[in-house]
Image (cartoon, rainbow, N blue to C red):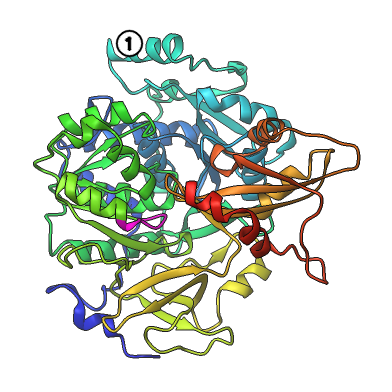
Amino acid sequence: MTERLWIKNYPEGVPEEIAPSNETITSLFEKVTQKYPDRIALTCHDHDVSFQQVNYYAQKLASFLQNEWLLKKGDHVAVMLPNLLQFPVTIFALLKLGCVFVNINPLYTASEVKQILQDSQAKAIIALDVFAHHIEQVQPELPDLKHMMTTKLADLYPFPKKQIIHFVATYIKGMKPKYNKAKFDHFHNALTYQKPFDNASVHIQPEDMACLQYSSGTTGTPKGTILLHKNIVANVQQVWAWIGVEIALDQQVVIGALPLYHIFALTANLFTFYLTGSRQVLIPNPRDIKSLVKTLIKTPFTIFNSINTLYAALLHNDTFRQSHFPHFKHTLSGGMSTTKRVADDWKAVTGVEVKEAYGLSEMSPAVTINKFSDGPFNGTVGYPLPSTLVSIRDKDGNELPINTNGEIWVTGPQKSPGFWHLPEINTEHFTEDGWLKTGDIGFLDEKGRLTISGRTKNMLIVSGFNVFPKEVENVLLQMPQVKDAAIVGTPSHSTGEKPVAFIVLEKDQSLTEKEVIDFCHTQLAHYKTPKTIFFLDELPKSPVGKVLKQDLKKKYLTQEAETA
């Protein structure tokens, strides 16, 4: 392949390759616990827990799951939690058992939860109680799902904080659980479980599966990316090698505002910094900008990784713009493209340059990253990480020269072995000689930096989340009044992209925009739901029946894009 142009532009001290490792996520967790037992590991709602306390809670939970649920190595367990202390405790407990954790977005509807539980063959699920009614609704249709557990928002807080937060959540914010508690075990009971955890019976290897990370598929159904311990460990070590020449890895205070169930935050925040001994401040609801700003003001944070949507929301807050953050040094952007306008404004307000990176679930996720010292925002997603190869190919798989757009192919030790139970899609995306065909379009410049130009996949990225039009179209077609439907993406200043629906109704049927949106809200997460609806007499189609979405964009969305 083409010369690795990026190597000569690496920051001083960054190696070309990372050494092969026999570590697992679990072994790294045990090492950091032993090294920094009394150091603060996590903060949430102003409550601190040490590395030793996290390990204690994880050990208690693991013991309960091992002895009461009889979970064993290789079992799949779903986790449906926002950024609470319970999230890392649960993840590390499952990893101690050798279980495979399956992340589920807590905002998913019952239908979406069912799809992932069904496909992953999860034996158990641990969820925040306010979302338990979705699980209860679909559990009778899931023969593999044997065990269910809920946790309350304040389960890991002491008196009187626990009582105060519970009162505010329940009676002021109206977060009242609506499920049959008798059908679920409860997290707080596991914390007092007395039987010891049999650690000696669990032997975890780097080749063992650690995670099934789900995203929607182009067919409208979710697909699970298999991530092994060695994939995630390699990615963490690659990032350590890159940023460790610039910062003290164990001395950071990291704001965890991005959802940990998303692969970007899971690796870039939780694993990358927890496993070095740095402190993380978890933000359960980043959409509450007022509360987030209060936390930022009183926290001596050094790192705040974000996405364009959240940068923009903060920049629209007057208190944020008028505040000073003297310890803040670095911010990494991923999940969706960052606009130059937002990046420039962020630098003007905070004094910190936004550095973009590129990744995807199948790569654990990090592939490329910019240098902290590379000057102003440059619009590229940076250089391939150590031990990572990037190649630009044409439609026949031939390598293309620099500054030429083509499909981005990538490989490295962080690469997933494939998708769960999807052999045909694996053949389509993973080559026999070890490459992953990303479906993204881009080019490498003369420095070896990657620029993303578009996507071959028919996919939108809304606030950092993948939205596949087929999935939304399938939901629209469930409405008896709908004869035909198409989803097209249009640029949005607030979310990067947003889905727009084009609907053809059955003869003599009628629907309002509100009725369509309300129905979608019962079947889809809010970010997948189209907020703009066009009702047409027919959809433009090719001779073979393919909807001509570019025609829809040109005819209907030019003005929409300008005002989005």
Q: Where 319 sits versus 491, above or below?
A: above
Report the residue that reaches farthest toward the left. 326
Q: Is residue 282 left or right of residue 468?
A: left
Q: Is residue 249 left or right of residue 491?
A: left
Q: Nearer the viewer, residue 284 or 16?
A: 284
Residue 39 at x, y percent in the picture: 15, 37
Mark 1, Cα crowd under 10 Å, few <14 / some 14-19 / many 20+, is few
Residue 171 at x, y percent in the picture: 44, 8
Q: Which residues are magenta?
A: 334-340
Q: Which residue is painted at 61% across and 42% down in the image?
A: 530
What secondary structure is marked by label 1? helix
Q: Is residue 349 left or right of residue 256?
A: left
Q: Which residue is painted at 67% across and 47% down in the image?
A: 501
Residue 151 at x, y percent in the picture: 46, 25
Residue type at the position of mark 1: Ile
Q: Main secondary structure of the magenta part?
A: loop
Q: Which residue is painted at 41% across and 28% down in the image?
A: 195
Within the image, what quadrant is residue 161 found in? top left
> Looking at the rendering, in which quadrant would you find the N terminus?
bottom left
Q: Which residue is painted at 55% across and 49% down in the image?
A: 560
Q: Is residue 441 magenta?
A: no
State whether residue 537 appears in this view. Answer: yes
Q: Where 276 sits versus 507, above or below?
A: below
Report the residue marked by disc 1: 164
Q: Nearer the viewer, residue 142 or 302?
A: 302
Residue 5 at x, y percent in the picture: 28, 85
State whether residue 466 appears in this view. Answer: no
Within the image, what quadrant is residue 367 found in? bottom left
